[in-house]
Image: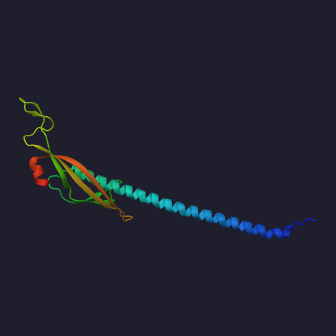
Amino acid sequence: MSHLLSPRSQRGVTLIVGLIMLLLLTLVIGSAFTLSGTSLKSVGNMQARDESIAAANIAIEQVVSSPFTTSPGAESIDVDINNDGVRDYTVQIATPVCISESEVPAVVIGKESGIRAGVVTPDSQWSTVWAISAQVTDPASGALATIRSGVRVLLTEAQKNTVCP
C-alpha cells in the first residue's frame, strides 16, 4: 500500500509557499521603487548641472562680447536660463587674466602701396590670450560648477601694455 498524503495535510504547505511567493514579490517591487527613485534623483542632478554649465557659458559669452580688455575686472552676472523674466542663476566671473601675448607680424603685400594683410593700422598688433573663469551655484541643490574658457583677442601695443603685464 502506498502512502499518499491526504489533501488535509497539504493545505498548510500551500499557504506557506503562497506567503513566500508574496514576500518575494513584495521585495522585488520595493527594490524597483527604490531604484527608480534613485534614477530620478540622478537625472535631476544631471539636469541641474547642465543648466549651471549653460548659465556659466552664457555669462562667459556676455563677457567676451563686451570690451572686457579695456579694464578687466571681476563681475557678477544674472542669468535667466528659461527666459521667464526671473533670474535663475547668478554667475561669478573672476577677473579675466592675460596669460600670453605675441606680436602679429605685418605681411606687406606691396612695397609701394604699404598695404598689410589683416588689420591696417600704424600701430603694431598683438595677439593676446585671456583666461576667463566662471563659477555658478545651483540655488536648488547648492552644487557648484566652475567653467574655464580661453579667448584670443587682437590688441594694439598700447592696449596690450595697459592690460597685459
Viewed as shown, does residue 44 lie left or right of 26?
left
Q: Quadrant of residue 47?
A: bottom left
Work out which residue is located at the far left of the displayed protein and give it.
Answer: 112
| Residue 82 falls left or right of residue 107 | right
Residue at 46% x, 59% y is 42
Quadrant of residue 6 in the image? Answer: bottom right
* Quarter in which the C terminus is drawn: bottom left
Residue 1 % position (x, y) = 94, 65
- 12 to the left or right of 135: right
Instruction: Relative to 150, say whether 6 is above or below.
Output: below
**Residue 19 x %, y %:** 71, 68
Q: Residue furthest front?
A: 1
Q: Residue at x 78, y 70 (%)?
A: 12
96 or 165: which is nearer to us? 165
Up/down of 124 relative to 99, above or below: above
Structure colour scheme = rainbow
Q: Residue at x 73, y 66 (%)?
A: 17
Front in this rendered view, residue 66 or 152: 152
Percent from the top left, x then y, of residue 79?
A: 30, 56
The quarter holding residue 11 reads bottom right
Q: Residue at x 12, y 43 (%)?
A: 125
Residue 23 visible to the viewer: yes
| Residue 67 shows in this picture | no
